[in-house]
Image: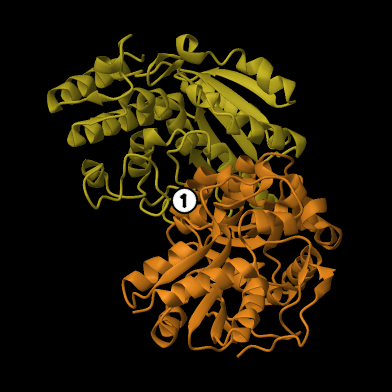
Amino acid sequence: MSRLTENIVLDTKEMRAAYCDALIKKARENEKIVVVDADVSHSVGTEPFYKEFPERSVNCGIMEAHAVGMCAGMSETGLVPFFHAFGVFATRRCFDQIFLSCAYQKLNVKIIGADPGVTAASNGGTHMPFEDIGLMRLIPGSVIIEPADVTMYDAAVSYMADNYGVHYLRTSRRKTMRIYKDGAKFVIGKANMLNDGRDVCIIASGIMVYEALKAADMLADKGISARVLDMHTIKPLDKEAAEKAARECGAIVTAENHNVTGGLGAAVCEALSETVPVPVERVGVKESFGEVGSQDYLQKRFGLTADNIVCAALKCISRKK
Amino acid sequence: MDRKITMKAAADIRKLCINELAAAGYGHIGGSMSICDILAVLYTDIMNIDPKDPKKPDRDYLVLSKGHCGPALYATLAYKGYFDVEELKTLNQGGTSLPSHCDRLKTTGIDISTGSLGQGLSLGVGVAMGKKIQGIGGRVFVIVGDGELQEGQNWEAVQFIAHNSLQNLVIIVDNNKRQLDGYTKDICQTFDYKAKFRSFGIHTFEADGHDVCDIYDKLTAAKNTCPSVVIMNTEKGHGCKFAEIPGFNHYMVISKEMADEATAEIDRRLEAGL
């Protein structure tokens, strides 16, 4: 079991500040790390990196396709580029560049997509990635990480810098609910169990981890014991943890701030259908484009709340044989 | 440079390329022929490379952004001794190290994989930036097609090159004036390249892309002091008799007899000093 905070409250630190702290810390020991931005250093919070490492910082301007290709070329010479853009532009806009310029020729590029799903909030549908995980999952050899709070960045950035390949970090910029205590342990590719349970297992990532924990409390009030897994690494999926949950709980609910097609729910279904087929319900965005609104409004609008998870859990348990 | 030696190299590369394509029975002959003289000059007289140490970090890089013309580059690499010329006969065969489009993971001497047009220049910029940031010597030459310049990503890259005064990269435009479906001027003309590049502040040269001396002079003039482009005026299919036609020559079926005839013609022209 991972060490959780006693009371989950909104963090005082922004996600982007914690990310940049982790990146600077890693860059002090790894001189090959360079930062590349497409005119979002202010938004994504990489400005402190520019101040400390001006010679290792490149702001391309608004040209994501070029930036990704350039990162691929940089990595051929031994650099480890971390490329930043809003999630929609970091993935969807330059998918062929990520696919062919980076992954196909086995180059070493780290892609950071900010504002996943409804966290794009007031930027609205044009800036709201519900499909970025699906796109990135299709790339052979890719790694996809989505932290639930600020405590994971050291582990995520270290992994990305130390391991070769195309890695995608899907990360909120703003303050988020603080789930873990300082010093919590993260192993890329291994889910964290946040609550044990026997009746149903909720597998969540990103902002949905908090909703999953709330849902587990609500289910406990109904006498239902729910396991909660933080599946912070969506690819490679921790199949072992998912299969164990399926065997021991017999029902799975996935919860993601993303389209249920192609995302975490799809990954879990694909894995379990081949090994431990049990009822699965997927909480997430269904066949919709994003739109403008507060994050709270959008979570309700797209069915991304603890209430939605509870409903899905009850339905899923009723489907058990 | 020695004009005769480089012309001979170009003729040899052309012959190797035609016979390589004939062994496969088909291929991208037109665009491959248009760059043979450019490749001959680059690999014979310009680039700092070592076929015995193909990965040396301070080497000059070549990015063939028009990756479908890989067969011309493979012929050049074989000519230079990166691998045995016999390998050329395996082009496009299952398991080959010579796929139709350039693949850095499969072919010794290929620096960057290409094939999705418009992406090579950004990749080359990345290599040049990597060299610059780490203080590694060597330049990057990127060959793009004139038709390929229809892809918008090229102009993102040109803007970046100009803004950052990237001096260790030379853009080479194979201005063969044709693309897959026909003449570029008919499909979507790319207007005045020289003016376009100059408007970005890029040092702009123009050469006869089939005159090895002119190619050499302009590539030499593209010094390591400011961002440069050399527009090579070429003819699609040049030097291969059966491909020197006004009709479709982007991709042709090629028999051994056609290759033999074209090879003899190359020898005849070389002998005549053409």
* Way the structure is coloured: by chain
**A84, above or below B201, in the image:** below
- The one nearer the camera, B163 or A188, is A188
Q: Residue at x 48, y 22 (%)?
A: B147
Does residue A60 appear left or right of residue A196 in this picture? Answer: right
Judging by colour alone, the chain drawn in orange in this rendered image is A
- Chain yellow in the figure, letter: B
Q: Amino acid at mark 1?
A: Asp
Q: Given the image, what chain letter belongs to the residue carrying mark 1?
A: B
Task: Report x, y in % for residue A93.
Answer: 58, 42
Q: Which residue is mark 1?
A: B50
User: Residue B22's image quarter?
Assistant: top left
Q: Is residue B151 visible?
A: yes
Q: Quadrant of the C terminus of chain B?
A: top left
Vertical side of B257 occupied by A200: above or below = below
Q: Residue furthest left?
A: B257
Secondary structure found at label 1 = loop
In which quarter of the view is residue A205 placed? bottom right
Q: Residue A292's spot in the image, x, y percent?
A: 72, 45
Q: Nearer the viewer, residue B115 or A94?
A: A94
Is residue B104 toward the left or the right of residue A173 in the image? left
Whether B67 is drawn above or below B3: the answer is: below
* Residue A274 in which image quadrant: bottom left
Characterize the local packing of mark 1: few (<14), some (14-19) or many (20 or more) Cα atoms within 10 angstroms. some
Q: Position of residue B244 (x, y in %)?
A: 31, 13
- Can the viewer see residue B138 in this picture? no
Task: Determine the residue positioned at 26% across, 21% down.
Answer: B267
Closer-to-camera residue (A260/B135): A260
